[in-house]
Each structure stands twice: as structure tokens, then as C-alpha cells.
Image (tube, rainbow, N blue to C red):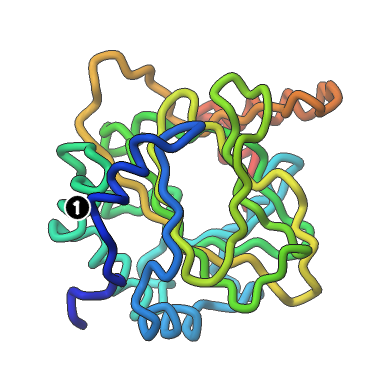
Amino acid sequence: MSYSILSHYNDEILSESFAKAQPFPHLIIDHFFKEEVAEALCDVFPNADEAFWYQYNNRIEIKLACNQIENLPPYILGILTKLNSDHYLKFFSQLTGITGLKSDPLMHGGGMHCIKPGGKLDVHIDYSIHPILKLERRLNLIVYLNKNWQADYGGYLELWEKDMSQCAKKILPIFNRAVIFATDDTSWHGHPEPLTSPLGICRKSLALYYLTEPRPATKERLRAQFVPRPHDPYDAELDKIRQLRSGNETAKDAYRV
């Protein structure tokens, strides 16, 4: 497999766009992979009914996920491994200006994601400190593999203002579109509206997260923190689920099968 798995970009323009993007640094890159790579990834992406998926099924997140190496199709594993290589660590560092990027060989929270009709992921910020590697999470990469995706299916990735006052941007998860964004205490994002695609049409994506040595001022957060949107009515049960989900010892009991 050649190292040239990505399309060609003007790195200088992308770097400038990343730094200036609002509500927090991010990039939206269409035709991210070379076409033949994206097509091959789509062809081998597993069906939603496979037994190995982790099932997140509660009122704040309904999705499937898999980061177990033995269950990743070999081609997908090969591409994710390349994206974790020194070659691409340097590429993403140059693109974002974040120095000292490290990969996560455990793909904690990453790998393959699949959301079936009715699924969602409420607005949240990600963990700040990797619970095993103790490195700081600095950059998210998500690549969507949804052919012929229609706007009325929904599935938008939402980026929210730092004060959670409003949604600043909605990104449709179309085929071979990548979203790269910096993570910190105010990078609120999610897919909070339930998916409205027809039965059998799922929202599929690959995800990797990049790390650095922890910065001195970073607050330790070992799990994602979920919040209500300004227009969401108060719900005591939901608040309890959010609290359980953010605790390192209670999170698994709150959300995963």
C-alpha cells in the first residue's frame, strides 16, 4: 500500500484556514482520500448487524463503535495504521500548527463508528487526558464514508460556540469528507438530532485522535462531558446520565453494551 493515500491539497491555505476557523480551529476537507482508497474503505466497512460492535444506547448517545484490531477489516486497519504513522503525524502537525503530535495505538474512542436511523450523539467535549496513555488529546480526525447522502437524512456534525449559546456550524457527513478539529475545554460538538435516514442506511465514519504531552494548564478530564443545548428542557434523568457518563468509574455502566 503506497503512502500516497490522500488527495493533494494546498497545505499553506489549509493551515491558514484551520487557524482562523470559528468557533474553534477546524478544517473540512472534501475528497480527503484518493478516490480508490475511499471506495475500498466503503466497500469493506462492516454492516451494522455485526456482533462485534459496541452498542451505546442511552438518552444521550445511540451509536455503534469498534476499535478492536481483530475486528477491523484488514484494509481499514491498514489505512488507520498509516494515518497513525510518523509520516502523517508530521503532515497533521504542519497542517494544524500543533507540534509534538503522537498517535494512539489503542485508538481509544476511535476506529469505526456507525449510527443507525434514530441514532445520535449529544453535544459534548472529549476527554482531555487519555485514561491509559496519560497524554493530552489535541486533534480529532473524522472521515465520513456515506455515499449518496441526502441532506434530509440529517446526521450533521454540529460545532457549537464556546459558551454553548448557539450552533455555529453544521457539517453534512457526505462521502470522503474529513473534518479535523482541535480539542480543548470549549470545543463543543456532536450529532444531537436523531438520524432520519431510511431503514438500512447508516451514518458511517472512521475516527482517529492525536495526542501530545500534557500542557501545564490542562484540566484533567478522563471521559467526555455532555451538556444540554440552550433550548433543551430541564430533565433530571438526563442530568444524571450526563454525570455518570463523565465519571471515569461510572461511564461504562452508563452507556455501553
Provide the residue designation for mark 1: 89
> Depth check: 253 or 148 in front?
148
73 horizontally vs 254: left or right: left
* Element marked by disc 1: helix
Q: 84 or 34, which is in the foreground? A: 34
| Number of numbered callouts drawn | 1
* x, y percent for residue 246: 56, 28
- x 64%, y 72%: residue: 48
- Identify the residue at image location x=77%, y=52%: 194
- The amino acid type of the residue labelled 1 equals Leu
> Looking at the image, which residue is at 21% across and 83% down?
1
Q: Quadrant of residue 116?
A: bottom right
Is 154 positioned to the left or the right of 214 in the image?
right
Rendering coords of residue 130 (x, y %): 34, 36
In the image, residue 218 above or below residue 52 = above
Q: Could you tell me residue 222's position as x and y percent? A: 43, 29
Q: Residue shown at 36%/72% (left/top)?
A: 33
Q: Residue furthest top?
A: 217
Give the vertical position of 112 relative to 225 (above or below). below
Looking at the image, residue 77 sits to the left or right of residue 115; the answer is left
Quadrant in the rendering for residue 154: bottom right
Q: Residues within 10 Å of mark 1 (few under 14, many from 20)?
A: many
